[in-house]
Amino acid sequence: MMSTKDSKKGDILLEMKDIRIDGFSDERWHKIIKGIDLTLHRGEVMGLIGESGAGKSTLGLASMGFTKPGCKITSGSVIFDGQELVTASEDQKRALWGTRIAYVAQSAAASFNPAHRLLNQTVEASLNQNLQSRDLAEADARDLYKQLQLPDPENIGDRYPHQVSGGQLQRMMTAMAMSPRPDLIIFDEPTTALDVTTQVEVLVAMRSIVEKFNTAALYITHDLAVVAQMADVIKVLRYGKEVEEADTRTMLKSPKEDYTKSLWSVRALEKTESPNEDIVLSIKNIDAAYNGSLKVLHNVNIRIPRGRTVAVVGESGSGKSTTARVITGLLPPMAGSVEFNGEALPAELKDRNKDQLQRIQMIYQSADTAMNPRQTIAEIIGRPLEFYHGLSGLQKQERVLELLKMIELDESFYDRLPSELSGGQKQRVCIARALAADPEIIICDEVTSALDQIVQEGILKLLLNLQKDYNITYVFITHDIAVVNAISDEIVVMYQGAVIEQGLKSEIMSPPHPEYTQLLLKSVPEMDPDWLTKLVKLR
């Protein structure tokens, strides 16, 4: 076996040959990965992209010789630095995991122990493998914090996970992965849940540290613009098979396969704005706080035109979701009012009548947690039909089937459970449940952020068609500017609990911009592999 000392950039580090993986569900085994080859060189970053269910994360974990419970590698080989991992013992693999092979997950919060300080968790792998003394490991960790542009790098490690922001925690996880100086890092959707400004900081930090330590990486994502900044090579997957592979510039400029071309074209969806002076909802002079403590909304004023889409944008903590909670009555404001069709709504949800509740519905970011896993799709969609319209029996059944048709799902979904649906299908069911109430306004809170771009496009087209057919008004909370272009008529920009500006999409997206709006727009990744480099130089 070649030692790490003797190896150099360009040498083959990871070779996967004819990998086949099965997964167990519905009382039988299903083929997930169907014969994929992968070669990764030292110092190289490969992007794995494709829609949900393509096998990206499964393949990434298999590169460690690992599969999730209910999955198994049925054939093929995984050779890491000369060592076969498919047939290796658990002890042999565990000697590599966390030291020579590291994993950075999508959810940083789930990867840290809330009871331990961040510094102790950063150095844990190095200490367990006796790679460094505690003093040296802690000094190195603080240096990593500095390189990852974390604030107060000397002391931030003394905090607990809940005492730092999402973006800071994601960089902390990268520091934890880098601490033992691994040869390979698997990044599994590490920036998906971050707002655009935070995402840029994390991408800059991750890229610079991977380059500095000549670390090879697999970067798993469904965001094409992000992978363009990180990867030297892109491999496109679909249905557990490879579609094509090429260096990043070639792949972006001239993909060969129709499927890859369709991925590239998704970002082109754009709604033509349509002004309307008929205001269905007015948010007037709203101040709000949680538990009566520090104010999180400061004199917020927003006008929502009937039958149009207002996108509310801003980084995490800007007050977008809090504004939605005030509109729905989940958070009574300290001051100000919410007017619906010219009449002030009761501040608290419990004081609103059935008609008021019916007219304003909400779709949440996580379809998984928004649905009862024990209820069938028919029961989930049927509940608002009973509550708001008094439907039962055959009438309810027929209306559920109509709603399924509206969201482009057939009657076979009627008796299914949420666990039997894909992410995009679950979100469609949540849309159907909101539609069942026959609302005038639907608040969409980051409803596409966890979806791959093809599924995302399908959801956005569905929402646009429903708006056209039923004159529904949307309040669309998002941090994705591509989504804003696709669906909005007007844009509201929020920062630190206040509205920075509001206007037609064409006005907000055109210069001159207020300073914060300019920062937001500059932070949106472009399908240009040099975009991040240029952005860093401009700072």
Image (tube, helix red, strand yellow):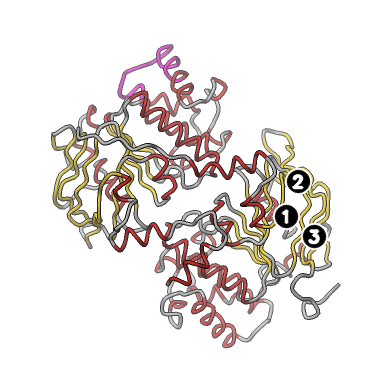
Q: Position of residue 256 (x, y in %)?
A: 69, 44
> Do the residues under discs 1 and 2 have CB atoms within 8 angstroms?
yes
- Residue at the outermost top position: 394
Circle on res. 460: none
Q: Position of residue 378 (x, y in %)?
A: 47, 24
- Which secondary structure lies at badge 2? strand
Which residue was labeled with disc 2?
A: 21
Distance (Cα) linking label 3 and label 1: 11 Å
Query: Of callouts 3 and 1, which one flags the residue occurring earlier in the amino acid sequence?
Result: 3
Residue 486 sits above or below residue 316 on the image = above
* Amino acid marked by disc 3: Glu
Distance (Cα) linking label 1 and label 2: 9 Å
Location of residue 279 (image quadrant): top left
* Amino acid marked by disc 2: Ile
Q: In this figure, what is the number of numbered marks? A: 3
Which residue is located at x 49 percent, y 28 percent?
377
Query: Of callouts 3 and 2, which one flags the residue occurring earlier in the amino acid sequence?
Result: 3
Residue 281 in the magenta stretch? The answer is no
Which residue was labeled with disc 3?
A: 15
Give the residues drawn in magenta, as a range: 384-400
Residue 2 sits above or below residue 475 on the image = below
Q: Position of residue 492 (x, y in %)?
A: 28, 49
Query: Of callouts 1 and 2, which one flags the residue occurring earlier in the amino acid sequence?
Result: 2
